[in-house]
């Protein structure tokens, strides 16, 4: 079974990574490969998390300065107050213009008998 082989390989790779036998990049490459992500398809491009906060320094003291790493307990959109407010504003704007899947007309249509057609905002035609 292919799925069982993938799960076994992932389990093996995860244990190797936890034992420091695989570096982070290689482990993420394995996970992306098993998820069928590829450098050859932009719609399925591999995912590598954004972990640094300093992209301007010429050198990074990774072992000495831990402030160069972002807080992984927060999503990218909530790293600081300005980003969070901007994200919420965009989210609210999208939600205002996106119809709900469970609008009242959808609920009414689900309650309508099979041989009845609903026209417009609820006018029933049998």
Image (spheres, rainbow, N blue to C red):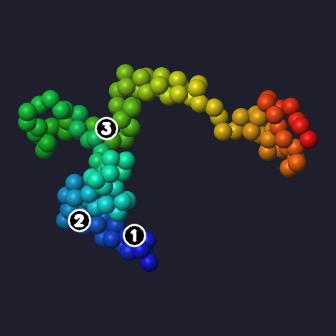
**Pick the front one: 40 or 26:** 40
Mark 2: few/some/many CA within 10 Å (<14, 14-19, 20+): few
Image height of 41 relative to 59, above or below: below
Mark 1: few/some/many CA within 10 Å (<14, 14-19, 20+): few
Q: Residue at x 37, y 47 (%)?
A: 43
**Screen quadrant of the C terminus:** top right
Q: Mark 2 points at which residue?
A: 19
Instruction: Give the x, y percent position of residue 88.
Output: 47, 26
Mark 3 or 1: the one toward you: 1
In the rendered image, which quarter is residue 75 located in? top left
* Tag 2 secondary structure: loop
Q: Quick one: which residue is furthest to the left in this view?
A: 59
In this rendering, would 112 be left or right of 28?
A: right
* Tag 1 secondary structure: helix
Q: Residue 71 carries which label?
A: 3
Instruction: Give the x, y percent position of residue 74.
Output: 38, 37
Q: Name the residue under label 1.
A: 7
Q: Which of marks 3 and 2 is nearer the N terminus?
A: 2
CA separation, marks 3 and 2?
23 Å
Instruction: Give the x, y percent position of residue 9.
Output: 33, 71
**Pick the front one: 90 or 53:** 90
Q: Residue at x 36, y 51 (%)?
A: 44
Instruction: State whether residue 11 appears in this view.
Output: no
């Amino acid at each position: 079974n292919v799925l069982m082989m993938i799960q076994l390989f992932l389990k093996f790779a995860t244990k190797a990574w936890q034992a420091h036998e695989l570096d982070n990049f290689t482990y993420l490459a394995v996970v992306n490969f098993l998820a069928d992500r590829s450098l050859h398809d932009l719609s399925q491009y591999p995912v590598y998390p954004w972990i640094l906060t300093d992209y301007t320094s010429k050198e990074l003291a990774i072992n000495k300065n831990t402030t160069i790493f972002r807080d992984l307990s927060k999503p990218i959109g909530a790293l600081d107050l300005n980003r969070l407010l901007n994200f919420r504003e965009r989210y609210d704007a999208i939600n205002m213009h996106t119809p709900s899947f469970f609008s009242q007309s959808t609920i009414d249509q689900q309650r309508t008998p099979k041989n009845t057609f609903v026209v417009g905002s609820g006018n029933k035609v049998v």
